[in-house]
C-alpha cells in the first residue's frame, strides 16, 4: 500500500525516484533516516551551544571535566587524548576557556611539574545551561512520539547498537 503524501519524508521521495538495483529499500530508508537525524541533532546542538557562546570543542572539554566527577579535574594530556587533539591545540583551546572563566589551571598535587585543568563555578553553570537547553530542544523534537513509541524506538535502536558492538568485538 502506498504511503499517504503527508506521511512521506524526503527519504521516501528519494527512494521512490531512484532505481537502486540490489538495494533493500527498507534497510536504505533506516540508514538514511538515522544519518539524517544524526546530522540534524548535531546541527541543533551546535546552534544551541552557539547561542550560549560555546563551540563544540569547548563543550567537549566542559563535558569531560564535568563527567570526571569531583573535583572536576583532568590533565591537559588526558583532555587532548579525549578530544583527539595535539597538546598544542588543546593548550590553545584551554587558553580560550580560561580567559572566559570556564576553567582554571591548578598544580597537580601528585606531580610537582604537572598541571590539571579544573572546571570553575562559571564552567559548571555554562555546562548545566548547555545541557538543559539541548535536552529541551531534543524533547521538542521527540514530542512527535508517544511515550510508548519512545520506548519501542529505543528498544529497536538498542538492538541495532548491540549488533554493531557484537561485530566490533568479533573483529578486535
Image (cartoon, helix red, strand yellow):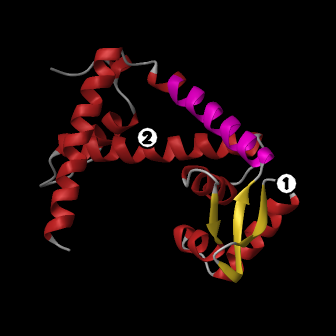
Instruction: Identify which residue is drawn at 25% across, 41% down.
Output: 158
- Pointer 1 residue: 101
Numbered tag placed on residue 37 in the rendering: 2
Left or right of residue 116: residue 163? left
The secondary structure that dominates the magenta segment is helix
Based on the displayed image, in which of its 4 quarters is residue 133 positioned?
top right
Instruction: Identify which residue is drawn at 53% across, 68% down.
Output: 82
**Vertical placement of residue 125 versus 102, above or below:** above
Q: Residue furthest right?
A: 99
Front residue (pair 64, 56): 64
Looking at the image, can residue 138 be seen? yes
Range of residues picked out in magenta: 121-139
Where residue 57 appears, as percent x and y from the top left, is 65, 60
Quarter in which the N terminus is drawn: top left
Instruction: Identify which residue is drawn at 63% across, 31% down.
Output: 132
Where residue 69 appears, as percent x and y from the top left, is 56, 51
Left or right of residue 46: residue 126? right
Amino acid at each position: 500500500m502506498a504511503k499517504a503524501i503527508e506521511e512521506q519524508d524526503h527519504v521516501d521521495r528519494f527512494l521512490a525516484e531512484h532505481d537502486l538495483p540490489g538495494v533493500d529499500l527498507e534497510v536504505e530508508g533506516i540508514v538514511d533516516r538515522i544519518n539524517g537525524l544524526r546530522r540534524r541533532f548535531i546541527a541543533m546542538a551546535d546552534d544551541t551551544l552557539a547561542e550560549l557562546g560555546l563551540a563544540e570543542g569547548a563543550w567537549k572539554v566542559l563535558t569531560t571535566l564535568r563527567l570526571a566527577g569531583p573535583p572536576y579535574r583532568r590533565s591537559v594530556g588526558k583532555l587532548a587524548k579525549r578530544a583527539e587533539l595535539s597538546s598544542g591545540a588543546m593548550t590553545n583551546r584551554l587558553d580560550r576557556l580560561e580567559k572566559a572563566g570556564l576553567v582554571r589551571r591548578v598544580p597537580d598535587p601528585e606531580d610537582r611539574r604537572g598541571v590539571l585543568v579544573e572546571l570553575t563555578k562559571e564552567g559548571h553553570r555554562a555546562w548545566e545551561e548547555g545541557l538543559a537547553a539541548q535536552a529541551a530542544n531534543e524533547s521538542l523534537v521527540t514530542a512527535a512520539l508517544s511515550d510508548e513509541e519512545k520506548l519501542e524506538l529505543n528498544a529497536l535502536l538498542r538492538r541495532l547498537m548491540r549488533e554493531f558492538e557484537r561485530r566490533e568485538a568479533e573483529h578486535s
